[in-house]
Image (cartoon, rainbow, N blue to C red):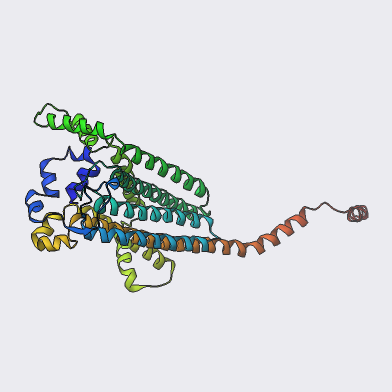
Amino acid sequence: MSSLALVDTFFPATASLLPHAVRDALSPAWASAACPAPSLALPPLPRRLGGSSGGAAAAASWPSLLAVTLAGAPLALALASRLERRAAAARTAPAVAEELRLWRAACVLFAGMNAAAALAHCVLPPATGGDPLAWPLRLARAADVACTGAASTFLIAASAARRAARRGRENGGAGADGARPRRLLATGAALAVAAVAFAGNAVPAGVAARAAAAAAAAAPSSASSWPRRAALAALARGQLPLANEAAYLAPTLLAAALLALSDVPRAPRRVLAALLAPVVGGGGARSRRARTDTWALGAAAAAALALASLALDAPACRLLGPRGFAAGANGVTALFVACDLAFVALTGYALAAAEEGREGHEEGGKAARQLRGPVRVTAVATAALALPATPAAAAKARRREKAR
């Protein structure tokens, strides 16, 4: 699946509005002809899964992408397992544990996205010439969209938890208020995103066929308004207009913006310290902050690579030819590799930030314990001064007063 085909398939309403210059930049006609989509022979698929009639041999399109997605799923689960182990070890810092579990949920959903993408992009038809509106394919695409959008909602919640914990430490608190409600809110938002994704890809085939005919009839006419053109393009793909944009693009772009604005360092001194942290090392608070910034910069670089990969098809085809293009030097494969790298960097960032937060929590507890002794002595002395005089002491004081 080329970059342009990816946009056309998952976001047809948006793709129908792209200028010709943008479409040519994503996948020019000469690149599509010179570097066709690679395929790998597979056992035949049954017709109930969308296979062609007669049980003809199936072919997995984009085998390099299939390898990346099949490796990405267990990688994401391994990252989630590591986050859960660290969360279980942070029993003395509940806010840190809750934040780590938000990152863990995002990794689990990212694993689901990789599994669904392997089916939607590579294994299920129309790569085999079957029905592009077959329900297994549409369900796989909906699962891809749902897992991506839901993972992004948990990234948004994790970034919010990180900011709350930072403010709590700056104000002398633990930052634990709202941690569990935030996770419940993120879970509800993720379920809502999944509902939009599955409902948005459930347009009946008859409606899709009529929309495709209407779009073909309206194509030569310039009088067709862009909302109608976008709606027909989405319905022809079996999707509700802008459903995938709402479930996939909106939370993903919002998560990227929040992480970039709140977690990626921008001050030149911090950026330089983050770049030097892997070489310089150290164990102080400043070094720990620099290592956290290093992971944040790595996630930002991976996100930039993912965005740039959409325009990689034509340069890769020109420089490396069909063999290099088929081996993995194409936009969509690079996009998934960049997403894997981004989640590795985000996990490293989450673990480094949690270590920083846990040590801050422990230092605050140590300071409180050190103050406990002097506070106890002061309280005892104050209580002693405030005690009322006993009757014997009062009588003694009266006799002293009379003697004077």
What x and y, as percent, mark residue 92?
A: 56, 61
Quadrant of residue 234 within the rendered picture: top left
What x and y, as percent, mark residue 292?
A: 38, 62
Q: Residue furthest top?
A: 223
Quadrant of residue 72 within the rendered picture: bottom left
User: Can residue 301 be seen by looking at this rendering?
Assistant: no
191 or 306, which is in the foreground?
A: 191
What x and y, as percent, mark residue 78?
A: 40, 63
175 or 208, which is in the foreground?
A: 208
The quarter of the image holding the C terminus is bottom right
Q: Residue furthest front?
A: 54
Residue drawn where x is 69% and y is 60% of the image? 376
Left/right placement of residue 260 relative to residue 52 reads right
Residue drawn where x is 11% and y is 58% of the image? 317
What x and y, as percent, mark residue 243?
A: 30, 37
User: Can residue 269 be seen by looking at this rendering?
Assistant: yes
Residue drawn where x is 47% and y is 48% of the image? 183
- Residue 23, placed above or below residue 334: above
Question: Exactly how many numbered labels are in the figure?
Answer: 0
Left/right placement of residue 83 relative to residue 325 reads right
287 or 381, which is in the foreground?
A: 287
